[in-house]
Structures are given as C-alpha cells and as structure tokens.
Image (cartoon, grey):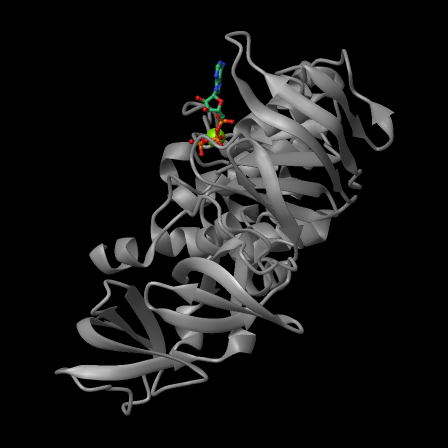
Amino acid sequence: MRGKDVVLDGVEITYPNGFTAVHQTDLTVEAGEFFSILGPSGCGKTTILRAVSGFVAPSRGAVRIGGEDQTGLGPNARPTALIFQNLALFPLMPVWENVAFGLEARGVAKRARRARAEELLALVALADQADKLPGELSGGQRQRVAIARALAVDPAVLLLDEPLSALDLKLRQHMRAELRAIQRKTGVTFIYITHDQGEALTMSDRIAVMNAGRIEQIGSADDVYSNPVSAFAASFVGEANQFAGRVTAQDGALAQIETAHGSFLGRNPTGLEVGSEAILFVRPEHTGAGAGRNSLTARLQRRDLEGPFVNLYLATRSGAQIALHVPNTGAVDIGAEGDVSVGFEPEQAVVLPAGPVARTGADIAAQ
Ligand SMILES: Nc1ncnc2c1ncn2[C@@H]1O[C@H](COP(=O)(O)OP(=O)(O)OP(=O)(O)O)[C@@H](O)[C@H]1O
Ligand SMILES: [Mg+2]
C-alpha cells in the first residue's frame, strides 16, 4: 500500500437546497500524511470527505488524488476507502470474512481472501481473532476490524469520519495510538475527521481547523495550539482565557490591548493596528498565581483536581472569568478567600482580530 496526495483545488460545495456547506477551499494533503480536519458540528467536515470519496460533486473546483482529476468518478472508481462513525460489520460473518468482504466482489478466490484477511488482521493486532464473530469482540477490536476491512481494497487514501466517537474514553485514547501505528505501517494517506481536539492534536502530522465551511488554519499540532491565527482557532483548540477590547499601541512584535478588565500586552502575529477590535487569548497553563507583566485581581470560584493538574477558576470584579491549570505539586494553592493576583507574560499571550469564538471563559467556569 502506498499513499497518494489529495488536492482540493478551489473546491466549493453547495447542496441541492442551495446551502453552501464548504466555501472555496484550497488544500493539499501530502502522500502518506496523517491529516486531521478539526471543527465543531455542522462546519462541513463530512461534506469535504464526501467530495473526496465521490459521494458528492463539488459545485466548483476539482479534487485531485495522486495528480489525477477525480471529477466524474464515482466512489468505486476512486483510490479511497471510507470509515464511518457507525461502522457496520456483518454480525453473522466471521471476522476474516468481514475483512475480505470487498475482495469477494472483486472476484478474488477464497484462499487468497483468507490470506489477505489474515495479513490485515495481523496489521491491526487481531491475528488470533479471524474466526470469531464481531459480537465476540470488544468495541475497540471491532473498530480495528473495520479498519482492516477498509484497507483490504488497497486504498491510497483512507477517509475516517469520527471513527472513534462510539467508543468510551479509555478505548478512544488507546485507539489513537493504534490508528497512528497502523497509518505509519501502511503509509496510506489518512484524512481523519473529528471534533475532538485531543484526537487531532495527538495523532496528526497536520491539522486543519475548520469553522462554518472554511478552513481557518492549517499547521502541526504545536503550531495550531501555540500559534493560533484566528479567534476561532485560539478558542476551539484547547482552552483559553480571553479578553476582548481594542488595540491601543503597537510595540514591535507586541500589541497593547485595552479591555474592560485591564490593559494587557500580547504577541501581535497578524499585525493588528491601533484602533482594531481584538481579543487577547492566553492559555490557562500560561496564566499563573502572582502578578506577571500583565496582571489582574480575581477571586477563586472553584478548584478542580484533575490528577497531575489542578484547575482553578477565578472571576474578576469586572466579570472576567479566568482559568489556571497548575501542576499538582502540592504547593499550588493561591488562597481560597479574598482577592488574589494572577498574571501572564506578554510572550505567552496572543492578540488576534475580533471574530467568532468557540468557547468563553464563562463557559469553562460553568461546565
Ligand atoms: N444533504 C444535505 N443537504 C443540505 N444541507 C446539508 C446536507 N448535508 C449536510 N448539510 C449541511 O451542511 C453543513 C455541514 O454538514 P456536515 O455534515 O459536513 O458537518 P460536519 O462538520 O460533518 O458536522 P458533524 O460534526 O456534526 O458531523 C451543515 O450545516 C449541514 O446541515
Ligand atoms: Mg460529520
């Protein structure tokens, strides 16, 4: 198996009812890459997968796979395989026949089918399960059977539409590593759709952050988490404390922002000018007890122990909600009563153009 690259060249997708689910998009997924599309429900993730797999035709632009224009080709004529959220295995068919199902339709003889199924089951670490029925497997094992089945037809590109969402948390976390390993071993291009940032951050070579039919940012996990370029990306990927206001000064790579909760300095990656409406974002793990170069006075509202971390939720008199994630070293408490100082460094904060946000500090505190 060898992966192929996938190019969306000016792809726009409008459904027959006139709704444009994906606005003009240019995107290149490299051959053999583990690429995730991360975004909230309804943002157009599945629609993009449908266009790549051939279930939906772009209203504009073209999809190319391995350099070949796919326009006019149906799903069976494309070098892709799709794994849905609710995988359907045949319950009365042994595992190996489920895996080899697509090969029978292609006229492959039974012995060769069995051999291929065993090879794929070994790949997904189910070598000894070939003769069981799907009902005799765990949820994670069934998911791996579905992956083996999708790989049986030798796709160059595997499209995975939230394949882990039906599994419980522990299994989902375990399957992340499994999926990554399977992708590495096969070299097949994976396009993985999820609204779970943890999945996207842990598995992907690169991530596209999508909102309302548009890709807002593409980058490595580090890049997207540490250097968000839009208010949506900053608020959707991970948690962030946020303060909306107006830029009052530019100072080299930094911008000063005046907000209802104080005046703060943060990085200015998009070159916002004085007078721009903006939002400052700073991660809870970069917000600390004690005043930094940016500081606020706040009162503790809630303290959640999360094993290695303690999450502290504070509120200012002016109504700002602030989250702190501090390592649980036993010396973290900031005083349960009265006003305390919290702060953050300008280099750890980012000032971005005002725009839709995914989550606010108030949402986090109210969770
Ligand atoms: N057949 C259709 N006709 C009209 N609109 C559609 C159709 N299918 C999807 N949509 C709309 O297009 C938008 C994008 O849908 P899509 O299924 O791509 O979202 P998604 O990002 O996969 O969401 P989820 O995470 O909930 O699966 C949504 O607003 C949806 O209502
Ligand atoms: Mg979807």
Residue at (33%, 63%) from the top-left corner? Answer: 260
Residue at (59%, 32%) from the top-left corner? Answer: 149
**View extreme (bottom): residue:** 331
* Foreground pick, 326 / 341: 341
x and y, in percent, of residue 366 in the image = 21, 55
**View extreme (top): residue:** 16
Residue at (42%, 34%) from the top-left corner? Answer: 41
x and y, in percent, of residue 237 in the image = 48, 54
x and y, in percent, of residue 367 in the image = 23, 55
* Foreground pick, 277 / 174: 277
The reply, left or right, for residue 219 in relation to residue 83 is right
The reply, left or right, for residue 138 in relation to residue 48 is left
Does 92 appear above or below 17?
A: below
How many marks do you count on the picture? Answer: 0
x and y, in percent, of residue 231 in the image = 50, 51
* Foreground pick, 78 / 358: 358
Q: Is residue 188 visible?
A: yes
Residue 40 image-quadrant placement:
top left
**View extreme (right): residue:** 67
Does 311 appear above or below 196?
A: below
Does 133 appear above or below 367?
A: above
Image quarter hosting the N terminus: top right
Q: Is residue 239 visible?
A: no
